Image (spheres, helix red, strand yellow):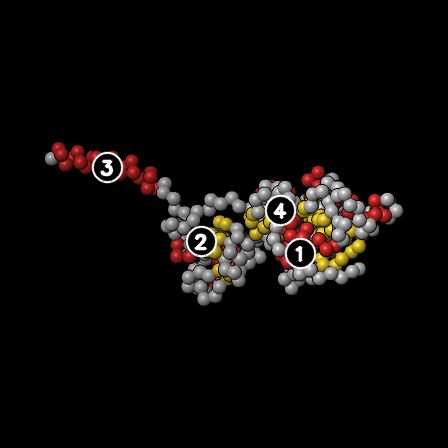
Amino acid sequence: MRLNSFISALLATASLVLAPAVFAQDNSPTRALGTPAETTNLPIQKIGPQDLISIQVYDAPEFTRSIRVSDGGEIGLPMLKQKIKVAGLLPDEISVLIADALKREHLLIDPFVTVTILDYHSRPISVTGAVKMPTIFQAIGDVSLLDALAKAGGPADNAGGELIVMRPNGINGGQSTQRIPIKALNDGSDPTLNVKLQGGDQVRIPTIGTVVVAGNVHQSGIFPVQEAGTTTVMTAIAQAQGLGDYHPDIAYIYRPDDQGVKHEIEVPLKEILKRKKPDVTLQAKDVLYVPDANGKKNFNLWMDRIAGVGTSAATGALIYRKF
């Protein structure tokens, strides 16, 4: 008898202890087990194809899930007859569309929907060319040109003097191109050069241009083109450690056009040396050939020595046309 009374008293005490916990339980709407929680801190931006979003429909776990936006910019939910176009919309706008669709198809009476961004994939920015670490990353938040260069480790040693920003302009799939001098960008002399980047932008740093100097010079080779307009016949010869023993009257520039056809340009070398005629500016991909006492017949031999391969590989399809 005493044992039964003790057990009854114990159960009564337990009920008093547990009652507050029961009444204190969270009565908020439930979320489907295993679905992503709203823990992302990504900036709110318009949704695009391949972005990953989290949809939570409270008290309706069958609709709560993570969905990747299709290439066409749409998402689909179970039991919804039509897909929902979400590309170009903010998460709150997508929440309204989903709630309206659920009500319209009589799946829920008054759904409460939230949409959060789990991962952006629709805003790629690529940084390629003469950079230390070519990269592709997503434009999340404000991204400047200097930010993009920093992500790529900065210009490489063989970088040219400018970079090229190519961005889609939305007109028949075209793109606009902007050339920006790297030195001015880095020193901040013109803040407008540090442009803001968006998804789809491409940043490329071309490698520094080169010229080939061959023939009657002390050190034939391939040399970098300096800033625009400063590499001339005489500076290129200086890079090749000067002329040999023979000083010809004429040197030759072989310059490719847009089709790859190389044109021959005569250079009055003797008169330039005597300062009777102005020096001639070289362009990237030019070949400067200084003949020796035998004239031009050794041109192919010198090209073989520079390239280390056959003449055709070194010079391309050599078709000469005098200007």
- Tell us which disc is closer to us: 3 or 4: 4
Q: Amino acid at mark 1?
A: Thr
- Tell us which disc is closer to us: 1 or 2: 1
Q: Amino acid at mark 4?
A: Ala
Q: Secondary structure at mark 3?
A: helix
Q: Secondary structure at mark 2?
A: strand
Q: Amino acid at mark 3?
A: Ala
Q: Residue at x 65, y 64 (%)?
A: 172
Residue 315 is labelled as 1
Q: Dot 3: few (<14), some (14–19), or many (≥20) neighbours within 10 Å?
A: few
Report the residue marked by disc 4.
Answer: 130
Q: Could you give the CA–CA distance between mark 3 and mark 2, rounded to whole angstroms? A: 46 Å
* x, y percent for residue 2: 13, 33
The quadrant holding residue 190 is top right
Closer to the camera in the image, 243 or 55: 243
Query: Height in image: 98 above or below 282?
Result: below
* x, y percent for residue 90: 56, 53
Q: Dot 2: few (<14), some (14–19), or many (≥20) neighbours within 10 Å?
A: some
- Tell us which disc is closer to us: 4 or 1: 1
- Tell us which disc is closer to us: 3 or 2: 2
Closer to the camera in the image, 98 or 4: 98
Q: Do residues under tags 1 and 3 come within 8 Å of each other at their CB atoms?
A: no
Q: Do residues under tags 4 and 1 come within 8 Å of each other at their CB atoms?
A: no
Q: Residue at x 75, y 49 (%)?
A: 292
Is 225 positioned to the left or the right of 22 in the image? right
N-terminal of the two: label 2 or label 4?
2
Q: Secondary structure at mark 1?
A: helix
Is 50 positioned to the left or the right of 323 in the image? left
Q: Quadrant of the C terminus?
A: bottom right
Residue 109 is labelled as none
Report the residue marked by disc 3.
Answer: 12
